[in-house]
Amino acid sequence: MPAFHDKALNRWRPPTCMVMASLAAMILLPGWRSRGAGADFVDITAEFSCTNRIQHGTRWYPHEWIHSVHCVVGTNLWFMEGNFAGNAESSLLFTGTNVIRYAVLNEGFAAGRKWTNMWPSDGVVGGHLGQENLAWLAFCSGPYLKRLGVIPLPAPAWCFTDDASHDRRQIFNDELGLPSSVEFFLPRELPDGSRIVYWPSDNYKVVESTNFQGWTFPLRFEVRQSTGPGGGNGTGLYDGADLVIVGHVTSIRQGRRPSIPAGSP
């Protein structure tokens, strides 16, 4: 099972009638339709190849998996869907004021259970999710980066529990403004306890990109994440961890206005 843990699945969920009424009202709001330079929406499918290694003593234990993500991007909304949690298929829609999430469990005794929840957002997917963060950073984050003092880690997990204290970013020079590279820094106490260092724990880098209808999108990108000195923070659960993700786009085309699946709870 992937090392990511989706804490959002345990969140409080508002009553179904409240969520669906809010969703219907938002879809009818003026400004729902994007006003991008080339096309209203761009439809992207990508695949992530992930390798997570946990260190115990002098030995490293690797775990590998692959998953795909589907995104629809505009200048004032985004949509993502995929098996982000490892045990549930999820769809997330940013409407301009809220993120609406529809999830279906696909493992365990509760397989098939469905629900919808919603939370206010300014376009940021959130710092307590998992692989959604990387899909958001790569394809959906451009219009919202200027609002963020620090970008959420692209791949938070149980062994990468801290948010970055600051980052260094470069963006593509176009209207959408997606990142071409981001370096993340976390505060870490040295193993001897002598001082705190700001460890470059994570970096995101676009290796290959394309211009599609006036916007620059990554075609291939890499994420490298490490716990740095003092991995495990004295918990005894592990002595170090690192994660490498290679993403590549398998399809990019003009898209349609996204929505949460019909008939969602």
Image (cartoon, rainbow, N blue to C red):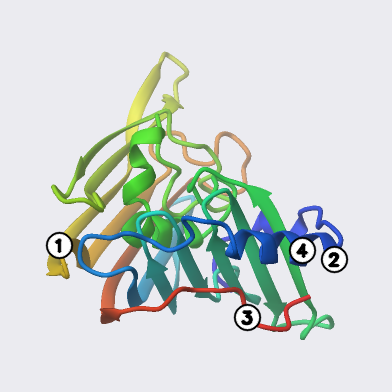
Q: Nearer the viewer, mark 3 or mark 1?
A: 3
Distance of mark 1 from mark 4, alpha carbons?
43 Å
Task: Please say if the residues under marks 2 and 1 sit with CB atoms less than 8 Å apart.
Answer: no
The kind of secondary structure element at disc 2 is helix
Relative side of 226 to 246, left or right: right
Mark 2 vs mark 1: which is more N-terminal? 2
Q: Which of 55 and 184 is in front in this view?
A: 184
Query: What is the quadrant of the N terminus in the image?
Result: bottom right
Amino acid type assigned to the residue bearing label 1 in the image: Val
Residue occupied by mark 1: 207
Q: What residue is drawn where x is 24% and y is 39%?
A: 169
Residue occupied by mark 4: 21
Mark 1 vs mark 4: which is more N-terminal? 4
Please tell me whether residue 129 is drawn above or below residue 185 in the rendered image.
below
Distance of mark 3 from mark 2, alpha carbons?
16 Å
Q: Which of marks 3 and 2 is in front?
A: 2
Label for residue 17?
2
Relative side of 66 to 216, left or right: right
Amino acid type assigned to the residue bearing label 2 in the image: Cys
Query: What is the quadrant of the C terminus in the image?
Result: bottom right
Q: What residue is drawn where x is 44% and y is 21%?
A: 192
Distance of mark 3 from mark 1, alpha carbons?
33 Å
Q: In which quarter of the image is residue 217?
A: bottom left
